Amino acid sequence: MENLNRAMKKYAQQTRILAAVDCIVFGYDGEELKLLVIQRGFEPFKGHWSLVGGFIQGDESAEDAASRVLKKLTGLDGVYMEQLHTFSKPDRDSVERTVSISFFSLIDIQQYKQQISEDYHAAWFPINQFPDMIFDHKEMVELAKEKLRYKAALHPILFELLPAKFTIPQLQNLYECVYDVTFDKGNFSRKILSTSLLVKQKDKDKLNSKKGAFYYKLDVRKYKTNLNAFLNFVPNPHTLKNSK
Amino acid sequence: MENLNRAMKKYAQQTRILAAVDCIVFGYDGEELKLLVIQRGFEPFKGHWSLVGGFIQGDESAEDAASRVLKKLTGLDGVYMEQLHTFSKPDRDSVERTVSISFFSLIDIQQYKQQISEDYHAAWFPINQFPDMIFDHKEMVELAKEKLRYKAALHPILFELLPAKFTIPQLQNLYECVYDVTFDKGNFSRKILSTSLLVKQKDKDKLNSKKGAFYYKLDVRKYKTNLNAFLNFVPNPHTLKNSK
DNA sequence: GCAAAAGTGTTGGAGCTACACCCATGC
DNA sequence: GCATGGGTGTAGCTCCAACACTTTTGC
């Protein structure tokens, strides 16, 4: 009992701190890779740009909180989301000591843009030209960009940025945006199709070319079981001739 | 001012929670991969097995806290450490709501074992036969094992588990432990040496064979700049004949 | 000398880059 | 019919798994 009391005192002495979540939301509109940021509508730092975030409530995990915050902003359930890193420097939040658990998400801008609430003053910025943001949010974005490139080189996650039906040239353009390189179209197509993750559709996209490119859909079953399979989409840069 | 007050009230309403760190410490003794666990010497859960952990103090980041805790236990500075994942389910800690930021570390057991404080009742367990632990520590270990395999397949981090001078066959045995496979010695040696990360020494290790194997040391400069270079030590399992 | 482990040589095949070429279509 | 982008064919190269072989030593 004596011991238990001492232990409880030790617990009691610890500082409790605020726990937040911040989401780095990447989107693709068929043209370029973008980042979703909001303009804070409340004090402190009203009017400043910020990542989508919020505090963890008593009955939810960080993952729950991130989903809740993202749903509130975009109206979306089931968005691709992954824990990125926890930021915990004592002075990272100038209002009060706060630990932030960051997440990154991937969404198709076309599909969802009308649902994004106006109240949040949300805006999409090109991934290389986003505004200054509060606290360490810029650092979060840079880390998320790195992680996205790293992960997408090994796992087929970029499909999350595309509509359900897409063409190989569209997919190629997305990869080229993410890695800022150009690929040989023939080799790219073969490499992607060799994964057997795509199912060819009967119809073609005729908007982007005269000949038209066949649509493909993800084989969702295979996709889910292969998320952890190594791929090798991005060769070592020094073996490439056609880097941008 | 009105707005600012409202904002401050919003901050004030949030729950502050305990923030802990837990370290998954992997070690290698030349024979097999092991996990460092401690037996709690205090209530609550006195006598139960647990990962090395502690609470984040007011003036330190999670990284600082993990280093501090690790140093207190092992006497070591500068141990390889990397943030793993943040565990935050509301009920994960049965004493009080606590968020835990987990880290994984790699150390050479031979080099450091005498320094590990007896007070903590620390013990090394084979990586596949560790005892039941409190809270979600088992889940943490499983995730760390996965991450170790994943990361070591692409980056030269396993050197952190070896002494400064080691032989290629020793390194091979380590890789075979981590991945539970066997490699062809000739191919393994060529692959490792092709990275140019190793510097051949003049002396040999004669304990493990009659002929003796040359010692090598890490080229520390190259190692540091190449940590992020992709390697490819572990081929796709289905292309291998000699899986265990 | 011979057993045992370190280390080298070599071969065949898989996969991939680069590039030439063919295809389908709108204008 | 010709420009445009989608898609196929293929030569040559690099890499690498497999395994035969040589080297070095202790007993």
Image (cartoon, coloured by chain):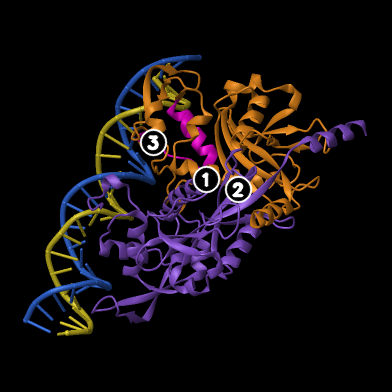
Chain colours: A orange, B purple, C blue, D yellow
Query: Which residue lies under the disc numbered 3?
Result: A226
What residue is pinned by disc 1?
B136
Most foreground residue, B146 or A29: B146
Residue B45 among magenta residues: no
**In which quadrant of the rendered view does residue B233 lie?**
bottom left
* Above or below, D19 relative to C6: above
Q: Nearer the viewer, residue A12 or A135?
A: A12
Q: First in sequence, mark 2 or 1: give its number.
A: 2
Write the start and end of the magenta stretch as one range. Answer: A167-190
Element type at mark 2 = strand
Dot 1 alpha-carbon crowd within 10 angstroms: few under 14, some 14 to 19, many 20 or more: some
- The image quadrant that residue B6 belongs to is top right
Tell us which disc is closer to us: 1 or 3: 1
What amino acid type is highlighted by mark number 1?
A: Asp
Q: CA distance from mark 1 to mark 3?
A: 27 Å
Query: Dot 1 falls on which chain?
Result: B
* Amino acid type at image mark 3: Asn
* Nearest-to-viewer mark from 3 and 2: 2
Dominant SS of magenta comes to helix
Confirm whether residue B163 shows in the render: no
